[in-house]
Amino acid sequence: MDKQNNLEEILHKVKEGSIGIEEAKEKLKTYENLGFARLDFHREKRQGFPEVIYGEGKTAPQIIEIVKGLQKRHRRILGTRISIEKAEMILEHFMDIEYSPLAETIFWKHADEPEILYDGYIAVVSAGTSDLKVAEEAAETIRAMGCETIRICDVGVAGIHRLLDQMETIQNAAVSVVVAGMEGALPSAVGGLVDHPVIAVPTSIGYGANFGGLSALLSMLNSCASGISVVNIDNGFGGGYNAALIHRMGNTKRRLEHENSLF
């Protein structure tokens, strides 16, 4: 449902008396000012997913207040870069929030909200066990956005046979998120073997000449395989978010049905 139709529906309900003026004003608010944050309620209408909480630099009490505010309007909430210390305080306030210690993410969904909203799946492929933290951030982001994820771990190019054994699963995905550090070669290997978009995520894993992930980033940007897009170093969230957006575009009917159910 677009913004204009939503406005007309609210005005019609006011006219017929099914909702009052104050409730209508609340529904039409575009954001809420918490003093330390302004919650963007219309982001889901504009972009298809609610505002995501970035945990670094925020205190646990601030995150708790943001979650409470977002729960009033949304059926799914994602928070990233949230330490275990902050998560312990947050979980004391919300019994139904899930925390991933490896990904450092929190995820909440309304009890009536389906886990998976779209057909098909996204493959999250990681080169080494050391890359799992970033890969899990991508996977948890994809999950929060209602997409199914299949994780394929430790298939880096140092043992290419491990990757080839998993190629059927990867090739059947709608999108692949490929996470790698060191020389960052894995996205090129995957990109040359699939017919779908590949989101490459460089990690800061590697020895000194890796320059904190810069060498992996440059390798991915210079990939000779077609169909590869690259996000920033250690940005599992960005890789997962982009992959989920692409996947949703291939599920237009189900996406529109879900969005219409929000109003």
Image (spheres, rainbow, N blue to C red):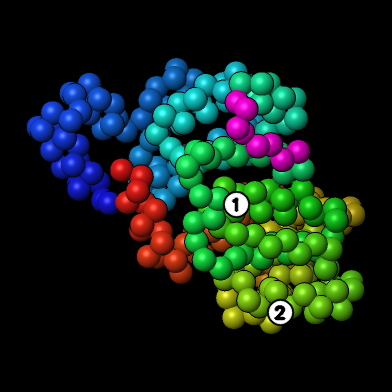
**Does 156 sit left or right of 193 as displayed?**
right
Residue span colored magenta: 94-101
Task: Locate the C terminus and report the quarter of the image it occupies.
Answer: top left
**Does 2 sit left or right of 64 as displayed?**
left
In the rendered image, residue 126, in percent from the top left (x then y), is placed at 77, 61
Pick whichever, 105 or 201, lies toward us: 105
225 to 62, vertically: above or below: below
> Which residue type does callout 1 highlight?
Arg
- Residue ID at (32%, 51%): 260
Residue 98 among those drawn in magenta: yes
255 to 88, vertically: above or below: below
In the rendered image, residue 187, in percent from the top left (x then y), is placed at 71, 70
The label shown at residue 82 is: none
- Residue ID at (72%, 44%): 103
Q: Quadrant of residue 249?
A: bottom left
Q: CA distance from mark 1 to mark 2?
A: 22 Å
The label shown at residue 143 is: 1
Is residue 86 at all visible to an observer of this figure? no
Query: Which residue, given by chain and number where applicable, does mark 2 sit on?
Result: 168
